[in-house]
Amino acid sequence: MTIPRSVYSDMTLSFLFRPSQRMHTPEEYEAAFAQKHSAGDAVLLVFVSLRTEGPTRLGTSVGKKCGNSVVRHALKRSIREAFRLLQHSLPPSVDVIVIPRPGVNPTMAQVQASLPKLIEKAVKKARRPLRTGEPDSPVKPPE
């Protein structure tokens, strides 16, 4: 006996990486970079931007210092795969840009270990209240 596809899909989590989970335009990347909420370690650098609704989206930026196009694309694939497997444990409605460190060729295990910690750390920074005197602070410092 086989289980109908509709029943089976309701029983499990989907680990697909859909187009709605990707950042597409340069404006989306610029908005995330402009907020300057980041966290990094020896393997990755992560920038986040909080949104009000929608799925968590991933963007990757791999520079030429990381290697030739084959190496850069392999890094992007490993980052996407780690994101795909971890997507249900990540906070919702967050844009995430992942940048691998130049000169480091991380394994899939290193990316999977590093990515959720860095995203959580950057999201905490993004959610903390601004202190007086910071550039985007609505509170002006005393003169």
Image (cartoon, rainbow, N blue to C red):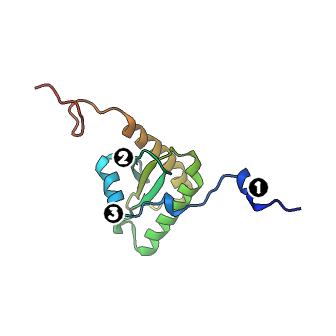
Mark 1 or 2 closer to N-term?
1
Mark 3 or 1 closer to N-term?
1
Toward the right, the furthest residue is 1
SS label for mark 2: strand
Q: Nearer the viewer, mark 1 or mark 2?
A: 1
| Relative horizontal placement of residue 69, taking residue 10 as reference (left or right) | left
Which quadrant holds residue 121? top left
Q: Amino acid at mark 3?
A: Pro
| Relative horizontal placement of residue 102, taking residue 134 as reference (left or right) | right
Locate residue 131, reporting x and y percent: 27, 30
Residue that numbered label 2 is attached to: 38
Residue shown at 46% from the left, 57% from the top: 58
Task: Give the distance between the C-alpha atoms of the residues marked 1 and 2, in whole angstroms.
Answer: 40 Å
Task: Give the distance between the C-alpha atoms of the residues marked 3 and 2, in whole angstroms.
Answer: 18 Å
Locate residue 72, reporting x and y percent: 43, 69
Toward the top, the furthest residue is 142
Numbered mark located on residue 7 in the image:
1
Locate residue 32, reporting x and y percent: 35, 52
